Amino acid sequence: MSGSSTSDAPAHPPALLTPGRQRLVAVIVACALFMQNLDGTVIATALPAMARTFHADPVHMNVALTSYLFALAVFIPASGWMADRFGTRQVFRAAIAVFTLGSVLCGRADSLGLLVAARIVQGMGGAMMLPVGRLVLLRSVPKDRLIGAMAWVTMPALVGPVIGPPVGGFIVTYLSWNWIFDINLPIGIAGFTLVSLFIVDMREPDPGRFDFAGLILSGLALGGFMAMLEVAGRDLVPAWAVLAMALTTLVAGTAYALRARRQARALLDFSLMRLPTFAISVLAGSLFRVGIGAVPFLLPMMIQLGFGRSAAQSGMITFASALGAIGVKPATQWVLRRFGFRRVLTLNGVACAVGLACCAAFRPGWPMAALYAVLMLNGVLRSIQFTAYNAVAYADVPRARMSAATTLYSMLQQVSLTIGIPISAGVLQLARDGTRHALPVTADFALAFLVVAAISGLAGPVSLLLPRNAGQEMSGWNGADR
């Protein structure tokens, strides 16, 4: 049993919240997502300036992004047990505090190594924010209202990518990149206060013992895998080191799988993959996110290094896709009700890949209106796809297994987003080596966009494997061919 009282924290409260209170909870959860999204888009715009400060290769600055995502993936497996043991409110508050502390430390880093260490601290906080925030919604909102609740969550969170690039570009151009991390301080304080006042402290009466050995094994497996992707083919470490990373991944992953089969409550419950909607959402969504995860790294770098634009100009261009994403959010529920999850995810998945491939055609001479049009359309398509995957994954998950489902889904989501960055950085490195350019040129970025678009394009056909009536209770689709 938990060592603290749970009298005020029911394990699985029924959907007693009024629609207004559900929206309030969704907006509070979105504050944390806003902070994460703002941070990610701001730092992406600042990478070239940070590279100059640290006297580092701009292409190698992708480690500032992947170190954060690496920490997310490694520590997310602990989030479900932490929320069940200590309560959603307590863990959510602590996560915001740790993330904010990491932001302050990032702003004071004077070397790439210290920046990476501070980003890992940020990632430890972020690892709890996303899955625990999602768990609050899944336990508070009935399935027929879940798409609407997810839209409320993602709508405010999308403000981060809208204002992040312009704000980051302005700060880097006219102030100092160090300030991009300090803007999280007031947001973190506001989020901490709102969670304290309005989030219900839900928890499980008996979450069992925490599996420290499982966390270490899963962390070694995930860490070895992502580190291997980060350095493979880029001559950053000797070949024997890459082989050691691959061996660590294989041994730790196998050991964790064998251990998890003997655990009543494994940190990562892969038995959820027996649910078709969950499994296909994970597989297709991961392919989709590999491509999308590369964009925050590739696009600002392309505009600044390939086009010769300033950070401020880059920010004013790259925010367009987030603006399109916000614009379509209110219509997402209607689209899914009209066509159903399977059809939307299949056709829209292909359209997303085509839109991503169009970025390969960007050139310095393109009119601004054309750049905005392509990026805004991409934002519209990606927004629908994100909401649909994030909702249908939980269509058939029993309420009692929501904690395990959010943990596994969030971890796999972050891994797939991380993979796109080293893949695109590796393509840039290979293209630059082939042309012997000191810095990547526009054609190098175009090749990277085409590679990640091809991977993302596989998501559409895989989505065809969804049951025809997948998520029907959520979407309200009546199953008729129209």
Image: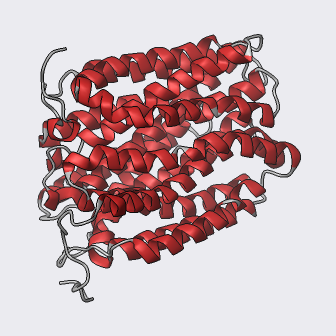
Where residue 387 appears, x then y in whole percent? 36, 38
Q: Is residue 153 above or below residue 20?
A: above
Where residue 4 appears, x then y in whole percent? 27, 88
Where residue 352 appears, x then y in whole percent? 43, 21
**Residue 389 lies in quadrant:** top left
**Visible residue check, residue 175:** yes
Q: Residue at x 57, y 56 (%)?
A: 35
Work out whether residue 386 or residue 98 is closer to the camera in this orientation and state it.
386
Work out whether residue 426 or residue 279 is closer to the camera in this orientation and state it.
279
What is the residue that sits farthest to the right in this orientation?
Answer: 174
Q: Residue at x 14, y 63 (%)?
A: 263
Q: Residue at x 39, y 19 (%)?
A: 457
Q: Is residue 139 left or right of residue 379?
A: left
Where residue 394 appears, x then y in whole percent? 22, 46
**Visible residue check, residue 216:** no
In which quadrant is the N terminus drawn? bottom left
Q: Residue at x 60, y 18 (%)?
A: 373
Q: Is residue 307 above or below residue 393?
A: above
Q: How is the image coloured?
A: secondary structure
Q: Is residue 305 above or below residue 4?
A: above
**Residue 317 lies in quadrant:** top right
In which quadrant is the C terminus drawn? top left
Work out whether residue 204 or residue 439 is closer to the camera in this orientation and state it.
204
Task: Count how many numbered circles sit on residues in the image.
Answer: 0
Q: Is residue 340 above or below residue 279?
A: above
